[in-house]
């Protein structure tokens, strides 16, 4: 029996209706979750294409299935475009098959470490990612994880990172974060990794789009491995990239071909067939990221974040580390007398979507921490600039402090209408 050619709204009203509702929710609210964005129609089209029908276990030119001539071209294009976006030579091998950021990071550990060997990353409650060695993640269960945090000032203390590295001698050091509002000094991390003979990996998931736009220093001159998701500031589909420097000194010292180890860790180590529709959508977003408009976009994200941070401070809100240098900031709600969960709910009541987040040295639980995390990638995609950031700050302040949600909700709706998704 043939599959239906009818549109979703004819074949599955319930799902079609829920998707319509979700689209409307995205249009009618302000998305300040810094890891979310709004993809182009072209990215959506690639994601919803016939490529979803294909199996392609293996890599271009080395597949376990027939019929992969076009998939091979798509995957090779995605790899080449990834190198182009980040100005890389052929010495950087690119794997585009990891299904998302967590499997990409885990593939690095599977490829380069033996179970139980030591890795060192930023601790989750201090702004790191689950997969950088946090105890409930497989990265903390199957490997020996040591964790660094930030100082009371909210900043990474590179001397403390160095001291910990010298004491623990990890085989892999990870830089990168999900809730760190400052520029990370990759050069300092490289030096520490060299001092202790560790691989140096950067997880640039949050800031990849900023790096592509030249709005944040690049990790590539320093790292042995770089991982990223493709759906945050890079504004692509959900997915991930792994970059491996074939000429890395540390890999030479270990006598390994780290690119091949990483490829093998993804397939057959952790995954089966890649999601070819996702690979095509990644290729599309990477092409978009080479355009001058994207460079302007990345720079505007940072300008917007800095303006928003400055305005929030004018309202007396307390920001971890005192501000931001990237796309996000953390508001400590302690002095407002509300928790992160309460703050998130007050904001959602007026149509502003954020996520609650721990702040460094948080005394509350991760489920109801002291802070909220906000960022500007999505509202910048909608075309908002500095003057709208002043209004957004006022709306956040109103929602958190003044109990007239319906008036604030109407202002949010008006702003959303002016800047459609
Ligand atoms: N969950 C992502 C974030 O929101 O930052 C990280 O994977």
Image (cartoon, rainbow, N blue to C red):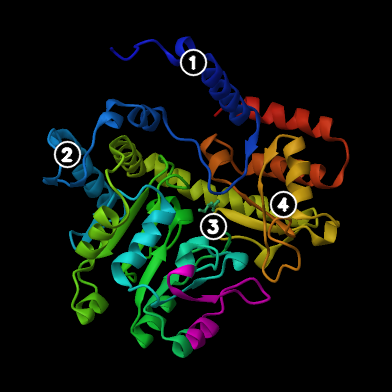
Which residue: 56% across, 21% down?
A: 20
Residue 362, image quadrant:
bottom right
Q: Is residue 292 visible?
A: yes
Spatial CA distance of label 1 from label 2 is 34 Å
Q: At 29% across and 66% down in the image, what residue appears? A: 111
Residue 147 lies within the magenta run: yes
- Residue 288, position in %: x, y? 35, 39
In three-dimensional space, the C-alpha distance between marks 4 and 1, rounded to whole angstroms, equals: 46 Å
Determine contact: label 2, label 3, CB under 8 Å.
no
Measure the C-alpha gap from mark 3 to mark 4. Answer: 16 Å
Disc 2: which residue? 73
Mark 3, mark 4: which one is toward the viewer? Answer: 3
Residue 211, can we see it? no
**Which numbered disc, 2 or 4, marks the residue closer to the eye?**
2
- The residue indicated by pointer 1 is 12
Closer mark to the observer between disc 1 and disc 2: 1
Magenta residues span 141-164
Residue 297 relative to residue 388: left or right: left
């Amino acid at each position: 029996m043939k599959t239906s050619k009818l549109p979703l709204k004819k074949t599955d009203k319930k799902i079609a209706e829920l998707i319509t509702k979700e689209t409307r929710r995205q249009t009618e609210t302000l998305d300040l979750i810094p890891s979310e964005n709004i993809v182009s129609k072209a990215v959506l089209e690639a994601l919803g294409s016939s490529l979803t029908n294909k199996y392609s276990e293996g890599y271009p030119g080395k597949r376990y299935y027939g019929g992969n001539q076009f998939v091979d071209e798509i995957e090779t294009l995605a790899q080449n475009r990834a190198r182009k976006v980040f100005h890389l030579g052929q010495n950087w091998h690119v794997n585009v098959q990891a299904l998302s950021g967590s499997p990409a990071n885990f593939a690095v550990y599977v490829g380069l470490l033996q179970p139980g060997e030591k890795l060192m990353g930023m601790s989750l409650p201090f702004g790191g990612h689950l997969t950088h060695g946090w105890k409930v993640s497989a990265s903390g269960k199957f490997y020996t994880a040591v964790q660094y945090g930030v100082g009371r000032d909210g900043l990474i203390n590179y001397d403390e990172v160095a001291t910990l590295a010298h004491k623990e001698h990890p085989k892999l050091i990870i830089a990168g974060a999900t809730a760190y509002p400052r520029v990370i000094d990759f050069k300092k991390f490289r030096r520490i990794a060299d001092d202790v003979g560790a691989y140096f990996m950067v997880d640039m998931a949050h800031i990849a789009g900023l790096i592509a736009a030249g709005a944040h220093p690049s990790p590539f001159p320093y790292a042995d491995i770089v991982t990223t998701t493709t759906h945050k500031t890079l504004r692509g589909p959900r997915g991930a990239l792994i970059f491996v420097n074939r000429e890395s000194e540390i890999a030479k010292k270990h006598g390994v071909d780290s690119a091949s180890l990483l490829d093998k860790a993804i397939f057959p180590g952790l995954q089966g067939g890649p999601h070819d529709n996702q690979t095509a959508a990644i290729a599309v977003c990477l092409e978009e990221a080479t355009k001058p408009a994207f460079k302007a976009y990345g720079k505007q994200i940072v300008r917007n974040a800095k303006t928003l941070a400055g305005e929030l401070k004018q309202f007396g809100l307390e920001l971890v580390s005192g501000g931001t240098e990237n796309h996000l900031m953390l508001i400590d709600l302690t002095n407002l007398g509300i928790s992160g969960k309460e703050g998130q709910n007050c904001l959602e009541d007026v149509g502003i979507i954020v996520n609650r987040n721990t702040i460094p040295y948080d005394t509350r639980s991760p489920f109801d921490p002291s802070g909220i995390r906000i960022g500007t990638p999505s509202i910048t995609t909608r075309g908002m600039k500095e003057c709208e950031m002043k209004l957004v700050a006022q709306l956040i302040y109103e929602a958190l402090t003044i109990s007239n949600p319906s008036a604030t909700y109407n202002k949010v709706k008006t702003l959303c209408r002016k800047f459609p998704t």
